[in-house]
Amino acid sequence: MTPALSTTSPATDGRPTGIADSSDPSDSATPAGLPDLPELPDLPELPELSTYSRLLDLLSADPAAYRTICHEPEGNTALASELRGHPLEQAAKSIVVRAKRSKQDGGGRYALAVVPGDRRVDLDAVGRALGSSRVGFADRTTAERLSGCASGSIIPFSFHPELELLVDHELLIHSHLYFNAARLDRSIELRTAVYKTLAQPQVLAIAA
């Protein structure tokens, strides 16, 4: 299926224009003739939605640097890349890892390792960067808590002070990179130079 593309504008606060988002209550109109319902208390915003909004707020500083791509829900990097229509090596695959310095180090350090979509995270290289020989993938609950994203939609940005951002240098050789935008049905195409400026990652060789 060909993805639906949208542009952004300051008038929509960086959000896609001309696209109905079923998760946005403002898209649902109350049918005429029905009585007003009692106002419900505010519900806490879902982590993936709050991160999505925060991401768009960040990108809205330079609307010309990115575009939003709408597609069928997909969390697999290879399949999402097909839906978006770009080479797999331009996809930013983001994985939360945990490094422990000793057996007594219960919490350890966490990092968001970002590699090209056609590569794997080199845990030994990540361990050297974090000063640990004991590195593994974080459990799903922790990964979602630190990234603020549902599994399969983690963005290559860190908004959490305990989550260090490590990016493989080979991902940054392309003019643009692509990633799920904290939602399975939304992706971002972003100029790489702008990504580096906004994300301020540690650039290393961490892909296998």
Image (cartoon, grey):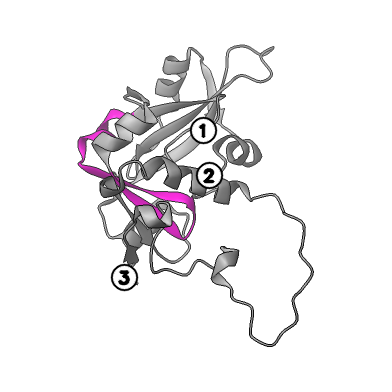
- What whole-number distance in Å separates the C-alpha atoms at marks 1 and 2? 8 Å
Which dot marks residue 51?
2
Q: Which residue is mark 1?
A: 159
Q: Depth check: 115 or 135 in front?
A: 115
Q: Is disc 2 placed on a helix, strand or loop?
A: helix
Q: Main secondary structure of the magenta part?
A: strand
- Please tell me in which quadrant of the rendered image residue 115 appears: top left
The answer to whether the residue labelled 1 contacts the one labelled 2, judged by CB atoms less than 8 Å apart, is yes
Seen at 51% across and 15% down, the residue is 133
Q: Of the residues shown, which amino acid type is indicated by label 1?
A: Phe
Quarter in which the C terminus is drawn? top left
The answer to whether the residue labelled 1 contacts the one labelled 3, judged by CB atoms less than 8 Å apart, is no
In this view, 120 is above or below 82: above
Q: Position of 192 compared to 33: left or right?
A: left
Q: Depth check: 26 or 144 in front?
A: 26
Seen at 38% across and 56% down, the residue is 11
Q: Of the residues shown, which amino acid type is indicated by label 3?
A: Thr
Residue 197 visible, this orientation? yes
- Please tell me in which quadrant of the rendered image residue 104 appears: top right
Q: Of the residues shown, which amino acid type is indicated by label 2?
A: Thr
- What whole-number distance in Å separates the C-alpha atoms at marks 2 and 3? 26 Å
Instruction: Estimate how packed mark 2 is, as few (under 14), some (14 to 19) or many (20 or more) residues with alpha carbons within 10 Å.
Output: many
Frontmost of labels 2 and 3 is 2
Which dot marks residue 2?
3
Residue situated furthest right in the rendering: 38
- What whole-number distance in Å separates the C-alpha atoms at marks 1 and 3? 31 Å
